[in-house]
C-alpha cells in the first residue's frame, strides 16, 4: 500500500525543471522574512512598552504569528522533492505549528490571569502622566 | 541558498532575542520574566529547526522542537498556577484576619 502510494507520488513528480521547487522556496523565504518582521515588532514592544499587560499584548500576538510563519516557511524550504519522507517532514512541521498555535495563547492567558489575581493593576492614564513628568524631570 | 537563508535567519533571531533577554534581566515583576522566558523558549523551537536544516537532519530535530515547545508550555502553566496559589493563600490569610477583627469588634 505504502509502496504503491510512494511510487504514485514519485510518478507524479514534475520532471521538467525545478520551477515548482523554486516557487516553494520563494514562498518559504518570504514567509520567514515576514516572521522576522513580526518578531522585530514583538521584541521592540517587549523592550519599550510601559506596562505588564501591554508587554504581554506584544509578546503574545507577535510571538505566536512569527513562530508559525517561520516554522511554516522552513517546512516549505526544506522540501527538496515530493517523496514520502519530505511529505512526512512537512506534516510533522505543520504539527508543531498547530501545537504552538494552540498552546502559546493558552499560556499567555494563564499568565495574564495569574498576574491579575496578583493585584497587578493595569496602567491608567494618571500613571502615564506621572511617568511622563518623571521623564521630563530626569531629562 | 537554503544554507545561507538558514544562517542569516538564525543570526537575525539571535540579535532580536537581545531585547527579550534584557526584559528577563531587569523585568520589574516576576511575570515579565516568565513571559520573556516563554517567548525565548518558543523561538528556540524555531532555532532547533534551523539547526536541523544546517545539519541536513530535520526529521530528527523537529522532534526536539516539539518536545521543547511542550516543555515550554508546561513550564508557563506551572509557574502561573504556582504564583496563583501563593496569592490565594495570601487572600485567605487576609480574610481570616478580617473575620477575627469583625469578631473582636
Image (cartoon, coloured by chain):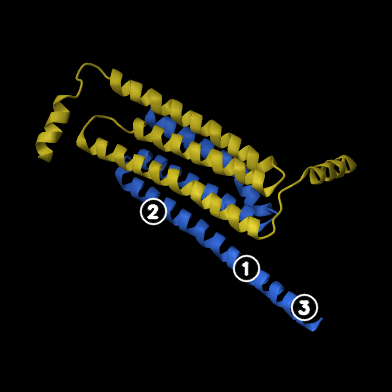
For mark 3, does the 10 Å Cα neighbourhood hold few (<14), some (14 to 19), or many (20 or more) residues? few
Looking at the picture, tell me which residue is in the foreground, A8 or B97: B97
Pointer 1 residue: B88
For mark 2, does the 10 Å Cα neighbourhood hold few (<14), some (14 to 19), or many (20 or more) residues? some
Pointer 2 residue: B67
Secondary structure under the numbered disc 1 in the rendered image: helix
Q: What's the residue at 74%, 80% (across, down)? A: B100
Return the chain for callout 2. Answer: B
Name the side, left or right, on which B31 lies relative to A23. Answer: right
Q: Quadrant of residue A80?
A: top left
Q: What's the residue at 64%, 66% (across, down)? A: B87
Q: Is residue B57 visible?
A: no
Q: Is residue B98 above or below residue A111?
A: below
Give me the C-alpha separation between circle 1 and circle 3.
21 Å
Name the side, left or right, on which B74 lies relative to A3. Answer: right
Chain B is shown in which shade? Answer: blue
Give me the C-alpha separation between circle 2 and circle 3.
52 Å
Q: Earlier in the sequence, mark 2 or mark 3?
A: 2
Percent x, y of residue A41: 60, 35
Percent x, y of residue A78: 33, 33
Chain A is shown in which shade? Answer: yellow
Pointer 3 residue: B102
Q: Is residue B86 above or below residue A72?
A: below
Question: Are discs 2 and 1 both within one chain?
Answer: yes
Q: What's the residue at 12%, 31% (across, down)? A: A7
Marker disc for residue A90: none
Give me the C-alpha separation between circle 2 and circle 1.
32 Å
Return the chain for callout 1. Answer: B
Q: Is residue B72 above or below residue B103?
A: above
* Residue found at the far top of this picture: A16
Question: Are discs 1 and 3 both within one chain?
Answer: yes
Return the chain for callout 3. Answer: B
Amino acid at each position: 500500500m505504502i509502496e504503491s502510494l510512494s511510487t504514485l507520488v514519485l510518478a507524479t513528480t514534475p520532471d521538467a525543471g525545478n520551477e515548482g521547487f523554486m516557487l516553494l522556496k520563494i514562498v518559504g523565504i518570504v514567509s520567514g522574512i515576514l516572521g522576522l518582521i513580526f518578531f522585530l515588532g514583538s521584541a521592540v514592544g517587549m523592550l519599550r512598552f510601559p506596562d505588564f499587560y501591554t508587554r504581554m499584548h506584544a509578546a503574545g500576538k507577535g510571538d505566536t504569528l512569527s513562530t508559525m510563519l517561520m516554522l511554516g516557511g522552513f517546512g516549505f524550504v526544506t522540501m527538496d522533492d515530493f517523496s514520502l519522507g519530505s511529505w512526512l517532514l512537512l506534516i510533522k512541521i505543520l504539527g508543531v505549528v498547530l501545537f504552538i498555535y494552540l498552546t502559546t495563547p493558552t499560556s499567555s492567558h494563564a499568565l495574564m490571569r495569574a498576574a491579575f489575581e496578583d493585584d497587578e493593576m493595569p496602567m491608567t492614564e494618571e500613571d502615564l502622566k506621572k511617568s511622563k513628568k518623571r521623564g521630563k524631570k530626569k531629562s | 541558498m537554503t544554507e545561507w537563508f538558514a544562517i542569516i535567519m538564525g543570526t537575525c533571531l539571535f540579535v532580536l532575542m537581545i531585547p527579550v533577554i534584557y526584559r528577563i534581566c531587569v523585568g520589574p515583576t516576576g511575570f515579565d520574566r516568565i513571559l520573556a522566558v516563554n517567548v525565548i523558549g518558543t523561538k528556540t523551537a524555531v532555532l532547533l529547526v534551523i539547526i536541523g536544516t544546517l545539519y541536513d537532519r530535520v526529521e530528527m530535530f523537529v522532534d526536539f522542537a516539539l518536545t521543547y515547545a511542550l516543555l515550554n508550555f508546561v513550564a508557563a502553566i506551572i509557574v502561573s498556577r504556582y504564583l496563583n496559589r501563593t496569592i490565594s493563600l495570601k487572600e485567605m490569610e487576609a480574610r481570616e484576619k478580617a473575620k477575627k477583627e469583625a469578631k473582636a469588634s
